[in-house]
Image (cartoon, helix red, strand yellow):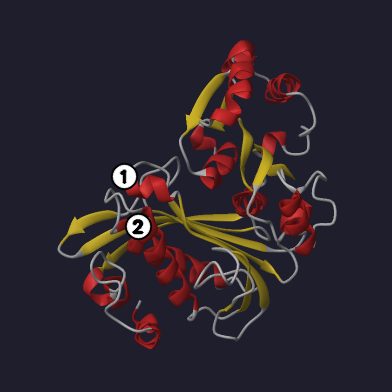
């Protein structure tokens, strides 16, 4: 894959973030997600790839765009797998809370796991702990190993976990052992990335979350030198059958980084929609300008770029069609005509 694709995909996440941000705090997560999805899908038409969505908004009969199997890109350039979450944290945007992102991962064709929409058990760490922990160890043993390898007492270890009823047993263990806990309301991708970002102060991310989000986080951690170990958690015969239909013959196997994102090059881009652990949200500056903060990374070079962009909104006509009250103003063909202006 060409390095220029890094900047191409961050333009896609920027537009999705700008579009979703118009719905921040309005209490309508469906419209916010729809705005981000429409913007992301339309902007993809300007990217020079022959892309196949392997993680997206659902099956073809569930999602009008960015559905699993959809072809995206302008048909030129390399064959690639695409994983997207146009709005990671729909509730966060609806309620005006932190850590909502627009996210894309891209890898050579056949590299990304076709993760079904179900829970995945996860253990995410930064470079200092990569290859040194195991998902099957009891949580207390994992914490002790992490503290040993990081050369710090357990009381100085900071662990992030989603604040969910299903995690109450794990949270009790964390408190009994005496580590610091940072509870996350939503934002599974950002949470799993946190241990690989030194400024976050997070040492481990544990618990269960969405499997598609796990693959996106694994792509980011490949670029950052971290690691995510996972295991799917099918809860019914139907989910087991779906795993096998998606090519996962042993749904309960331990998933390594190689299983989730392959061994070749990976690109990852995210733009903040609301303020978060490592990216600021969309900020409206007055004079019809908005500021976005993004991260874009490449596994091959381990280059991590933080991009601050100032957008003059009148020159971004595509954004107008996904603002509140404007969603139906233009047809799909009109949208395609606007892509080149972003």
Q: Residue at x 79, y 27 (%)?
A: 137
Q: Residue at x 23, y 67 (%)?
A: 325
Residue 138 in the image: above or below residue 326: above
Q: Label 1: how many residues lie within 10 Å, few (<14), some (14-19) or many (20+)? A: some
Q: Give the side of residue 122 with respect to residue 158, left or right.
A: right
- Judging by the rendered image, the residue that carries numbered circle 1 is 96
What label sits on residue 292 in the rendered view?
Answer: 2
Q: Give the side of residue 58 with respect to residue 121, left or right.
A: left
Q: Quadrant of residue 188?
A: top right
Q: Quadrant of residue 105?
A: bottom right
Q: Give the side of residue 121 with respect to residue 247, left or right.
A: left
State the separation of the CA atoms marked 1 and 2: 16 Å
Q: Residue at x 28, y 59 (%)?
A: 22
Could you say whether the residue bearing mark 2 is in a helix, strand or loop? strand
Q: Give the side of residue 1 with respect to residue 24, left or right.
A: right
Q: Residue at x 73, y 20 (%)?
A: 148
Could you say whether the residue bearing mark 1 is in a helix, strand or loop? loop
Nearest to N terminus: mark 1 or mark 2: 1
What number of labels is visible?
2
Q: Position of residue 112 (x, y in %)?
A: 70, 62
Q: Would residue 163 be visible to someone looking at this image?
A: yes
Q: Label 2: how many residues lie within 10 Å, few (<14), some (14-19) or many (20+)? A: many
């Amino acid at each position: 894959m060409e390095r220029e694709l890094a900047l191409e995909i961050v333009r896609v996440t920027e537009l999705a973030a700008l579009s979703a941000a118009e719905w921040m705090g309005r209490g309508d997560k469906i419209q916010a997600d729809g705005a981000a999805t429409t913007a992301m899908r339309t902007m993809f038409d300007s990217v020079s790839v022959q892309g196949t969505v392997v993680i997206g908004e659902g099956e073809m009969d569930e999602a009008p765009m960015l559905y699993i199997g959809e072809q995206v890109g302008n048909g030129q350039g390399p064959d690639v797998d695409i994983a997207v979450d146009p709005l990671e944290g729909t509730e966060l945007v609806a309620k005006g809370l932190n850590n909502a992102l627009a996210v894309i991962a891209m890898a050579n064709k056949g590299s990304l796991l076709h993760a079904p929409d179900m829970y995945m058990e996860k253990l995410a760490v930064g470079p200092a702990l990569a290859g040194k922990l195991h998902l099957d160890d009891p949580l207390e043993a994992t914490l002790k190993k992490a503290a040993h390898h990081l050369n710090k007492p357990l009381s100085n270890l900071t662990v992030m976990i989603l604040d969910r009823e299903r995690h109450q047993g794990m949270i009790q263990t964390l408190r009994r052992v005496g580590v610091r806990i940072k509870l996350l309301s939503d934002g599974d991708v950002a949470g799993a990335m946190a241990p690989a970002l030194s400024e976050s102060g997070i040492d481990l991310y544990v618990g269960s979350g969405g499997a598609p989000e796990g693959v996106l986080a694994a792509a980011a951690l490949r670029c950052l030198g971290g690691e995510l170990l996972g295991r799917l958690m099918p809860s019914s015969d139907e989910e087991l059958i779906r795993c096998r239909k998606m090519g996962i013959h042993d749904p309960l196997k331990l998933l390594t980084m190689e299983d989730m994102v392959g061994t070749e090059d990976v690109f990852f881009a995210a733009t903040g929609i609301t303020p978060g652990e490592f990216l600021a949200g969309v900020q409206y500056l007055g004079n019809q300008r908005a500021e976005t903060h993004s991260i874009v990374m490449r596994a091959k070079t381990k280059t991590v770029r933080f991009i601050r962009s100032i957008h003059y909104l009148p020159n971004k006509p595509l954004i107008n069609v996904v603002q509140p009250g404007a969603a139906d103003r233009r047809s799909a063909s009109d949208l395609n005509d606007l892509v080149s202006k972003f």
